[in-house]
Structures are given as structure tokens and as C-alpha cells.
Amino acid sequence: QVQLVESGGGLVQAGGSLRLSCTASGSIRSIDVMGWYRQAPGMQRELVVTITSGGSTNYADSVKGRFTISRDNAKNTVYLQMNSLKPEDTAVYSCNAEIITIARSRLLRWGQGTQVTVSS
């Protein structure tokens, strides 16, 4: 059983900061790409940023310069530091991970999502 657990969402004023965390647990051999996605009410889920095991990143244009992704491979954890938050950043943020299990299966797992609300 492999699962992702997120934490760190909440309510913040525009211009503020939040830090999200997502930790994978279970029968994990390694993790390839980890990422953050978000879905606002009435909208499709969109990519925020991804990071490879080697540290290469891919940011959505809307968050470049404001959000920073990082990961701790030893802890199977990915972080999202969000600065200069805007009301349009309000969404449910979910992490995902491409996981190689101990049995050498490749799985894509999603976290349960965490609400981020930015007030104006």
C-alpha cells in the first residue's frame, strides 16, 4: 500500500505565504517525478509545478517567481513554498508522485488534496 499525505493548506491574505508538504509512505523503492496540481471551483485541474528525482523543475507560468518546489528524497517528501499569494491562487492543491514499489511496480498516486484560500 502506497499513499500520499498532504499538509499545510489554509487561509491567508493576499501577499502572504504558505508552505505545503506531501509525504509518500508504503512499500517504496524510489520516486521519479513528484508534482503539485490545483483545481479551483468550476475549473479543470491544472499543473502547478513538477520536480524530478534529480531536481529538474517545470513551473506553470502563473506561479513562476512566486512558488518554489523542493523535495527531500530521503524522506519521500515534496514541498511547495508559495509566496506573494493572490486570490486567484485559491484552489484545492493536490500532490502526485510516480512511485516505483519494492516489487518494482510503477504507480501513480495522488494525495487527498488540501484547500488553499487567499483573501483579498
Image: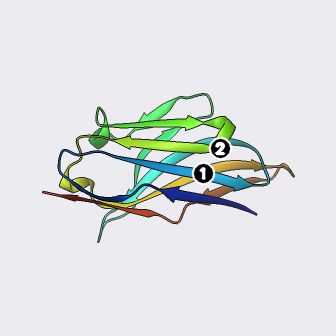
Residue projecting furthest to the left: 120
- Quarter occupied by residue 31: top right
Residue located at (55% from left, 37% from top):
71
Residue located at (29% from left, 36% from top):
66
Q: Are marks 2 and 1 in contact (CB under 8 Å)?
A: yes
- Quarter occupied by residue 55: top right
- Residue on which disc 2 sits: 76
Which of these two is toward me, 116 or 39?
A: 116
Q: CA distance from mark 2 to mark 1?
A: 6 Å
- Could you tell me which quadrant the C terminus lies in? bottom left
- Could you tell me which quadrant the N terminus lies in? bottom right
Question: Helix, strand or loop at disc 1?
Answer: strand
Residue count near mark 1 (Cα–Cα under 10 Å), binned few <14, some 14–19, many ≥20: many
Q: Earlier in the sequence, mark 2 or mark 1?
A: 1
- Quarter occupied by residue 60: top left
Residue 51 picture location, percent across and down: 53, 37
Residue projecting furthest to the bottom: 42
Residue 63 vertical placement versus 42 (above, below): above
Residue type at mark 1 is Thr
Residue type at mark 2 is Asn
Residue 26 picture location, percent across and down: 75, 56
- Residue on which disc 1 sits: 23
